[in-house]
Image (tube, coloured by chain):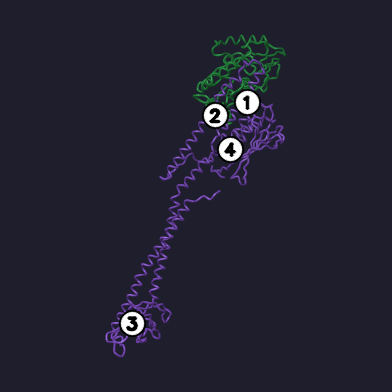
Chain colours: A purple, B green
C-alpha cells in the first residue's frame, strides 16, 4: 500500500521550517543591530582618546612633550591594561613616546605613506589580544616632520559583551522557537481532532454501535458529517425497502401456497401429491430467504447480549412439549452465568433448529451442554452449546452433506431440510460455527460455537 | 367435541372450519384476538386453533390471558413466520402444539385429535371401553371387531364419553360439546342419543348417574382410579 501523506506531518514540517528560518534571520538581524552601535561606540571612544592625546601633546623643537595635561585615563598607566597610546615620527621612523601601559610593546610604524590622514587597523597586542588601533597623521606648523598619533584598545570586552548578547539571543530565540513549534503541534493536532472524531464515529457505525454520526462538528467538517449521515440514512432506507419487498412477496405467496397445499379438488391423487410437494418446497425456500433477507445489511449489534440459561430452558421446554408424545427428555447442563454476544431471536433460531433435529432422531434423550472457551486470536471469549441425541447418528463422511440447502439426510422425517444450513448462516453472521461430531450419547452431536461473555454476578458483562 | 378457531384470514378460517366439521367437530370461529379471547373465556372447548398474528389482540396475549384465567383447554398455535422465537414465545405462553403456515389441513386435524386425546389422558389414538373400540383417526367404531354405524350426533356423544371415560359427564356438558349454537339445545334429545347408543353398543357400558349425568365405564373391569 502506497504511503499516504499526512496533513498533520506536512503542516508541522512547514511550520517548523518557517519558524526556524524566521527565527534565524531575526536572530542575525538582532545580533547585528546590537553589535553595530557597540562597535561604533568603542571606536568613537578611541577617537575621542586620540583627539585628547593630540590636544595635550605639545611640540617642542627638540622633541615632543607629551601629556602637558594628564590624559585622565588611568588605564594608560597600568601595564598591559589593554589601552595604549603611541606617538611616532613617520619621516624619520622612530617611536617618540608611548603610554606606560605599553611597556615593551610597540605599534609598528606604517612604512608606506598612504593618502589617508587617519587609519584604523587591527593588531595583536602584547598578551595576544586583538587590538583596534586608530592612527592619525599630524604635522604642526613650524615643526619639522610628520608624526603619527595612535591609540589602541583591547576588543576583548567588546567581544565578550557581544558574545554574551549573542548567547542570550540564541537561548531566548531557541526557547521561543520550541514554544512556537509546540504551539503549532498542538494547533495541528487539536485542529485535526474533528477528523479523528469522525474516524471513531464511523468505526462505531461499522461495528453496529451507532446508526449515524453524532456530535458537534466544526463548520468545515459539518458538511462531510451531514453528507455521511444522509448516505447512511439513504442506504438504510433502501435496505428497509428491500427487506420489506422480500417480506411482502413471501407473505403474499403464503396464502396461495396455503390454498394450493390444501386444495382437495385435484384431478388425481398423484397430481395432488405433486402439488403438495412443490408447495412444500416453495415454502422452504420462502422461509429460508426471509431469514436471509432479515439479515441483510444488519451488522450484528455488538452491544446486544443474551443470557444463555433462560433461552436454553425455554427451548428445552418448548421442544419437550412438542415431542412429549414420544417421551423425549430434553436436558440441560451448564450455561449459568454465560451469555451469547448477539440477539436473542438468533440464538433461539439456532438452538430451536438444532434441538428439533436432535429430537426428531433421538430415541429418548436430547442433551444440551453449554461451556465457555477462551480462544486464542479470535477476539475474546466464546461459548459453545452442544446438542447431543441418542439416536442412530450420522456417518462422518455424510455429515457435510447435511448442510446442503434442501437436502435432507433422511427423507423419512418431516422437515424442510434447511435447518442446519440456516443455523450455519446465522452463526456465520456472528463469526461462529456449527460442527457435527460423534456424541457421548451414541447419536449425533451438533456443536454450536459463538462469541460469548461471562455475566458477572452483579450483572456486569465480562469478556 | 367442540373446537374454537381463531384466525383472521377468512379463507383459511373457512377451510379449517369445514374440515373440522367434516370430522364431526362442533366449530366456533373468531376473526380477531379480542373476539377469540372472549369466546375461549366464556365457552367450553375441547381444543382451540389459535393463529399468532391476530389483529386487535395478538395470539400470544390471548393465550397468556387464558392461562392466567385458568382456561386450560389444549391450544394448537398457527405460526406464520416459522421462527423458533415465535414458537418458543407461543409455548411459553401455554401452547400445546404448533403448525406452520401454510399447512396441510390433515396435519391440523391429526394434531387436534392428538391434543384432545392427550388432554383426556389417553395415550393411544384408539379409545376403548369393554368390547367397544373407537379409532379417533378414522372415526370407526367397532363392537367386538364388527363396525357399528352411528349417526353424527351419536358418534359425537360416544366420542365425548369415550374421551372422558370413567368420569361423570353432566347433560349440560354433553350438550355444550355436542351441539352447535344454532341448534335448539334441548337436553332431552341427549337422552334419545344415549338410548340409541345403548341399543347399538350394549346398555351395560353407559351408566346413568342419577342427578349428575352419564358415565361410560366397563363394568367388568376392576375399579378405575377416578
Chain letter of the residue carrying label 1: A
Residue B220 vs residue A396, the one in the foreground: A396
> Which residue is identified by label 2?
A246
* Label placed on residue A429: 4
**Distance of label 4 from label 3 (alpha carbons):** 103 Å
Q: Secondary structure at mark 3?
A: strand
> Which residue is identified by label 1?
A281
Disc on the earlier residue, 2 or 4: 2
Chain letter of the residue carrying label 3: A
* Label placed on residue A149: 3
Q: Confirm whether circles 1 and 3 share one chain.
A: yes
**Distance of label 3 from label 2 (alpha carbons):** 113 Å
Q: Is residue A49 visible?
A: yes
- Residue A433 screen position, x and y as percent: 63, 39
**Distance of label 1 from label 4 (alpha carbons):** 25 Å
Q: Secondary structure at mark 4?
A: helix
**Distance of label 2 from label 1 (alpha carbons):** 17 Å
Residue A166, compared with residue A428, is above or below; it is: below
Amino acid at each position: 500500500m502506497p504511503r499516504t501523506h499526512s496533513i498533520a506531518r506536512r503542516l508541522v514540517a512547514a511550520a517548523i521550517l518557517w519558524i526556524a528560518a524566521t527565527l534565524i534571520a531575526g536572530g542575525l538581524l538582532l545580533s547585528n543591530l546590537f553589535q553595530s552601535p557597540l562597535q561604533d561606540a568603542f571606536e568613537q571612544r578611541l577617537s575621542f582618546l586620540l583627539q585628547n592625546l593630540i590636544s595635550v601633546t605639545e611640540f617642542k623643537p627638540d622633541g615632543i612633550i607629551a601629556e602637558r595635561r594628564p590624559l585622565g585615563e588611568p588605564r594608560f598607566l597600568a601595564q598591559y591594561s589593554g589601552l595604549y597610546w603611541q606617538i611616532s615620527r613617520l619621516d624619520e621612523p622612530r617611536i617618540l613616546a608611548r603610554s606606560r601601559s605599553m611597556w615593551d610593546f610597540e605599534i609598528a610604524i606604517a612604512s608606506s605613506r598612504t593618502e589617508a590622514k587617519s587609519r584604523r587597523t587591527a593588531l595583536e597586542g602584547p598578551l595576544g589580544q586583538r587590538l583596534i588601533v586608530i592612527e592619525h597623521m599630524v604635522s604642526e606648523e613650524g615643526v619639522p616632520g610628520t608624526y603619527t598619533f595612535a591609540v589602541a584598545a583591547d576588543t576583548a570586552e567588546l567581544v565578550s559583551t557581544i558574545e554574551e548578547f549573542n548567547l542570550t539571543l540564541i537561548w531566548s530565540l531557541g526557547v521561543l522557537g520550541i514554544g512556537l513549534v509546540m504551539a503549532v503541534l498542538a494547533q495541528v493536532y487539536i485542529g485535526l481532532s474533528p477528523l479523528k472524531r469522525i474516524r471513531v464515529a464511523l468505526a462505531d457505525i461499522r461495528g453496529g454501535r451507532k446508526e449515524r454520526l453524532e456530535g458537534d462538528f466544526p463548520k468545515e467538517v459539518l458538511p462531510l458529517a451531514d453528507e455521511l449521515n444522509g448516505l447512511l440514512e439513504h442506504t438504510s432506507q433502501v435496505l428497509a425497502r428491500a427487506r420489506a419487498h422480500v417480506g411482502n412477496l413471501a407473505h403474499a405467496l403464503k396464502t396461495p401456497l396455503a390454498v394450493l397445499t390444501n386444495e382437495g379438488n385435484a384431478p388425481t391423487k398423484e397430481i395432488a401429491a405433486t402439488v403438495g410437494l412443490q408447495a412444500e418446497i416453495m415454502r422452504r425456500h420462502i422461509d429460508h430467504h426471509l431469514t436471509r433477507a432479515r439479515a441483510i445489511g444488519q451488522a450484528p449489534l455488538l452491544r446486544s447480549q443474551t443470557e444463555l440459561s433462560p433461552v436454553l430452558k425455554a427451548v428445552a421446554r418448548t421442544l419437550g412439549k412438542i415431542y412429549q408424545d414420544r417421551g423425549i427428555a430434553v436436558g440441560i447442563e451448564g450455561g449459568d452465568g454465560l451469555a451469547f454476544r448477539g440477539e436473542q431471536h438468533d440464538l433461539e433460531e439456532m438452538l430451536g433448529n438444532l434441538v428439533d433435529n436432535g429430537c426428531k432422531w433421538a430415541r429418548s434423550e436430547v442433551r444440551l451442554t453449554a461451556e465457555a472457551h477462551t480462544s486464542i486470536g479470535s477476539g475474546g471469549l466464546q461459548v459453545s452449546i452442544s446438542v447431543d441425541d441418542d439416536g442412530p447418528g450420522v456417518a462422518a463422511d455424510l455429515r457435510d452433506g447435511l448442510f446442503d440447502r434442501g437436502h435432507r439426510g433422511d427423507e423419512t422425517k418431516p422437515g424442510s431440510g434447511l435447518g442446519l444450513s440456516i443455523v450455519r448462516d446465522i452463526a456465520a453472521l456472528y463469526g461462529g460455527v456449527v460442527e457435527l461430531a460423534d456424541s457421548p450419547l451414541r447419536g449425533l452431536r451438533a456443536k454450536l460455537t459463538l462469541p460469548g461473555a461471562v455475566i458477572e454476578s452483579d450483572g456486569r458483562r465480562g469478556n | 367435541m367442540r373446537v374454537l378457531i381463531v384466525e383472521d384470514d377468512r379463507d383459511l378460517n373457512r377451510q379449517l372450519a369445514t374440515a373440522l366439521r367434516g370430522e364431526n367437530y362442533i366449530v366456533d370461529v373468531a376473526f380477531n384476538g379480542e373476539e377469540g379471547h372472549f369466546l375461549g373465556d366464556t365457552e367450553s372447548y375441547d381444543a382451540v386453533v389459535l393463529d399468532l398474528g391476530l389483529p386487535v389482540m395478538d395470539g400470544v396475549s390471548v393465550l397468556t390471558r387464558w392461562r392466567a384465567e385458568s382456561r386450560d383447554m389444549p391450544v394448537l398455535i398457527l405460526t406464520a413466520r416459522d421462527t423458533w422465537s415465535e414458537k418458543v414465545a407461543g409455548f411459553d405462553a401455554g401452547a400445546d402444539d404448533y403448525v406452520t403456515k401454510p399447512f396441510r389441513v390433515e396435519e391440523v386435524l391429526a394434531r387436534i385429535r392428538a391434543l384432545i386425546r392427550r388432554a383426556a389422558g389417553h395415550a393411544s389414538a384408539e379409545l376403548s371401553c369393554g368390547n367397544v373400540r373407537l379409532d379417533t383417526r378414522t372415526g370407526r367404531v367397532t363392537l367386538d371387531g364388527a363396525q357399528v354405524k352411528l349417526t353424527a350426533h351419536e358418534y359425537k356423544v360416544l366420542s365425548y364419553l369415550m374421551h372422558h371415560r370413567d368420569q361423570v359427564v353432566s347433560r349440560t356438558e354433553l350438550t355444550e360439546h355436542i351441539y352447535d349454537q344454532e341448534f335448539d339445545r334441548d337436553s332431552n334429545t341427549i337422552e334419545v342419543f344415549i338410548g340409541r347408543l345403548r341399543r347399538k353398543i350394549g346398555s351395560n357400558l353407559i351408566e346413568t348417574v342419577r342427578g349428575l349425568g352419564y358415565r361410560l365405564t366397563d363394568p367388568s373391569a376392576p375399579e378405575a382410579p377416578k
